[in-house]
Image: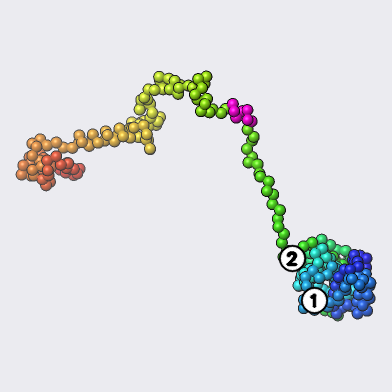
Amino acid sequence: MADFGISAGQFVAVVWDKSSPMEALKDLVDKLRALTGDEGRVSVENINQLLQSAHKESSFDIILSGIIPGSTTLHSAEILAEMARILRPSGRLFLKEPVETAVVNNSKVKTASKLCSALTLSGLVEVKELQRKFLSPEEIQSVREHLGYHSDSLLSVQITGKKPDFEVGSSSQLKLSTTKKSSGKPAVDPAAAKLWTLSANDMEDESVDLIDSDELLDPEDMKKPDPASLRAASCGEGKKRKACKNCTCGLAEELEREKSRDQISSQPKSACGNCYLGDAFRCASCPYLGMPAFRPGEKVLLSDSNLNDA
């Protein structure tokens, strides 16, 4: 009994089921009451009625389930969660349960690792296996009678878990550091800062020589560059001059002006000066023959077919 760490003044719950021998249950409860004394309390709960008992949370220091000699109790996830709820912070659960040594699909009996995982999922910490032993013939018979389960690879394991030292749903204020963080910039030497600082008073100091920026330029720097020297290497090269895309050296504008002059020079010129009056005043070789009259100075465009016909 000393293995459970029960002492005077503690509240202990003993959980049993139909597989628990009554004489063994009574003997266990008597020993626990002797350990807890008058200031403590020992409660006995049937596992099937535990969810309906409506114990307040943090009611017990220690819970013993399936520990009664000869018991073959199985613990569901709901039962484990309820036991974790009614445990006090830092309280402990001790349980014993038959387990399979091999994984069996759709088996109501868990493996030892799955049983430990179930305790962890219920909210307990420091879950560990304390003891493992083969089932006695009486316990094997109890499994067959009360659980309706037949297997030759069963073991009995005793596992413990501890409730964290806080209650579920509790909150605590976080202690945030209010220390001002460093900006990460290197410290500036005051002497160096003073050395490189130029104030308004220094500007009026006659001992400070200021250099005129114009004196830094040579006469060659003041000359206007030749536009031809600004052209790119490929701009205007080849038999046919052609400006580069996004030309900035002026070749594109120059070619545009040449094109305009060529269009003006290619316009037909009147020999008699009466072409704008109409066909009655035009000569036989007039390029405007057949076109309507137009105002003097008005620009008239001739198609290629008109020029060929003429």
First in sequence, mark 1 or 2: give its number.
Answer: 1
Q: How crowded is mark 2: few (under 14 residues within 10 Å), some or many (20 or more)?
A: some
Pick the quarter of the image with the N terminus. bottom right
Q: Give the range drawn in magenta.
A: 189-195
Query: Which mark, by number, is residue 168?
Result: 2
Q: Residue 193 appears at what percent x and percent y?
A: 60, 30
The correct choice, above or below, for 124 with respect to 216 in the image is below
Name the foreground residue: 215 vs 270: 215
Can the viewer see residue 269?
yes
Q: Quadrant of residue 160?
A: bottom right
Name the foreground residue: 147 vs 207: 207
> Would you name the residue on which mark 1 appears?
50
Secondary structure mostly seen in magenta is helix
Q: Quadrant of residue 101?
A: bottom right
Residue at 79% in and 61% down? 165
Q: Residue 133 appears at what percent x and percent y?
A: 90, 67
Alpha-carbon span between mark 1 and mark 2: 19 Å
Q: Residue 31 appears at what percent x and percent y?
A: 94, 72
Q: How crowded is mark 1: few (under 14 residues within 10 Å), some or many (20 or more)?
A: some
